[in-house]
Each structure stands twice: as structure tokens, then as C-alpha cells.
């Protein structure tokens, strides 16, 4: 009888620990790297403003996305190391599982639409997909991530309605301004 009670108690503790881990948010998302990503985006908006074609503008933004991804990964790794956290703990894995499919879909849409007239919808799609990913991933990250995703969705919708006329400015406002604003919130209130 005592062995059964002990076994049941251990199973209950495992269940409770697992539930607590699933409910927690990852704190490894780096606010400092969010600010750096925003600065990269603002620089890209300035560079793309001088581009003569939409394709040239989009190539500048694609290059910026690569640099931003490296900055985000590096900042997250450094923050997790400083906080002595495991990046791919349960909330970290869930965060990535929400965000990565949207980023991959954006890359595939870019390839599919690159040489078509619908290329001018790519900035809206990028913001909408990133907003969807952040909104979903925000349930597992620092609190500012979810509203940032919602803001991306709103600006992405505006970019879709304006289809190309203000794309560069809206990309700069979203990927630049929102990353700086919400990155600062994460930096200030969620450990860097």
C-alpha cells in the first residue's frame, strides 16, 4: 500500500511539473536583438527608398531579413547563456514551432511570386505571416511579443489594401519601428 501511494505521488508530481513547464513563457527572447533588428530594418528602408524597381527594393529587404535572423538568434543565444537558460526548453520549442512555419511560408511565397505581377503583394504577405507567427508564438514568450504580432497584422493588412504604393515605408514602420518599440519593452521588463 505504501509503495502504491508513493508511486501515485511521484506520478502526480511529474504531471504537475510538466504542466507548470508547459504554462511558463520563454524568457530567452532578446529585447536587445529586437532593437538591433529594428535598426537593420530602418537602414534597409532608407536603402530601399533609393532603389529603382520593386525587385531591387525586395532584394534589399531579403538581405536585411538574413542579417536580422542572425542578430535575433545571436541575441537570444547570448541572453539565454547569461540567464543560464536552455533555449529549447518546452516554451522555447513551442515558440519556434509557432514562428518557423510562418517564416518558411513567407520564403516559399517569395519564391513562387518573385517573377509575377503579384510580387507587389510580398511585403503585405511578409508582414501578415510574421504577425501570425508572432501572435501564436507570443503565447509562449514575453508579454510584448503578442501585441507586436497584432500590430504586424494591422500594418500588413494596410499594406495589402495599398498594394505596393507604400510598401517600403510600411516595411520600415513594421520591421523597424515595431521591433524597436517592443524590443525595448522586452529589454526593459523581461531581462534584456
Image: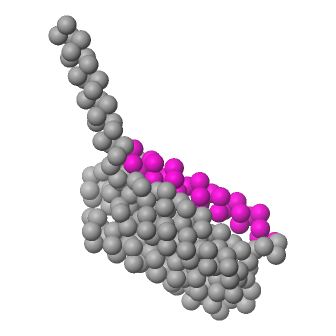
Front residue (pair 160, 54): 160
Q: Which residues are magenta?
A: 89-115
* Residue 13 appears left or right of 28: left
- Image position, residue 3 (x, y; %): 21, 10
Residue 57 in view, yes or no: no
Residue 165 in view, yes or no: yes
The residue at the point 29 percent across, 23 percent down is 11
- Image position, residue 37 (x, y; %): 46, 74
* Residue 74 appears left or right of 8: right
Residue 102, quarter of picture? bottom right
Magenta-drawn stretch, dominant element (helix, strand or loop): helix
Of all residues, the one furthest to the right in this rendering is 116
The residue at the point 38 percent across, 57 percent down is 141
In the rendered image, the quadrant that contains the N terminus is top left
In the rendered image, the quadrant that contains the C terminus is bottom left
Question: How is the rendered protein coloured?
Answer: one colour
> Is 102 in the magenta?
yes
Of all residues, the one furthest to the top in this rendering is 1
The residue at the point 33 percent across, 38 percent down is 19
> Is 181 in the magenta?
no
Label total for image: 0
* Residue 24 appears left or right of 112: left
- Image position, residue 145 (x, y; %): 42, 65
Residue 147, relative to residue 23: is it above or below?
Answer: below
Of all residues, the one furthest to the bottom in this rendering is 50
The residue at the point 70 percent across, 60 percent down is 108
Residue 166, quarter of picture? bottom right
Front residue (pair 171, 42): 171
Amino acid at each position: 500500500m505504501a509503495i502504491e501511494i508513493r508511486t501515485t505521488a511521484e506520478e502526480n508530481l511529474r504531471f504537475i511539473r510538466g504542466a507548470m513547464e508547459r504554462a511558463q513563457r520563454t524568457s530567452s527572447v532578446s529585447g536587445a536583438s529586437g532593437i538591433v533588428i529594428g535598426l537593420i530594418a530602418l537602414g534597409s528602408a532608407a536603402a530601399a527608398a533609393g532603389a529603382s524597381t520593386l525587385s531591387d527594393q525586395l532584394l534589399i529587404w531579403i538581405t536585411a531579413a538574413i542579417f536580422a535572423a542572425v542578430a535575433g538568434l545571436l541575441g537570444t543565444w547570448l541572453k539565454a547563456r547569461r540567464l543560464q537558460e536552455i533555449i529549447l526548453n518546452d516554451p522555447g520549442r513551442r515558440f519556434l514551432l509557432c514562428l518557423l512555419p510562418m517564416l518558411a511560408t513567407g520564403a516559399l511565397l517569395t519564391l513562387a511570386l518573385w517573377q509575377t505581377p503579384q510580387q507587389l503583394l510580398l511585403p503585405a504577405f511578409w508582414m501578415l505571416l510574421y504577425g501570425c507567427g508572432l501572435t501564436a508564438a507570443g503565447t509562449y514568450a514575453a508579454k510584448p511579443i503578442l501585441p507586436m504580432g497584432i500590430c504586424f497584422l494591422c500594418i500588413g493588412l494596410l499594406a495589402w489594401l495599398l498594394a505596393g504604393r507604400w510598401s517600403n515605408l510600411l516595411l520600415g514602420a513594421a520591421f523597424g519601428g515595431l521591433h524597436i518599440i517592443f524590443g525595448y519593452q522586452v529589454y526593459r521588463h523581461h531581462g534584456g
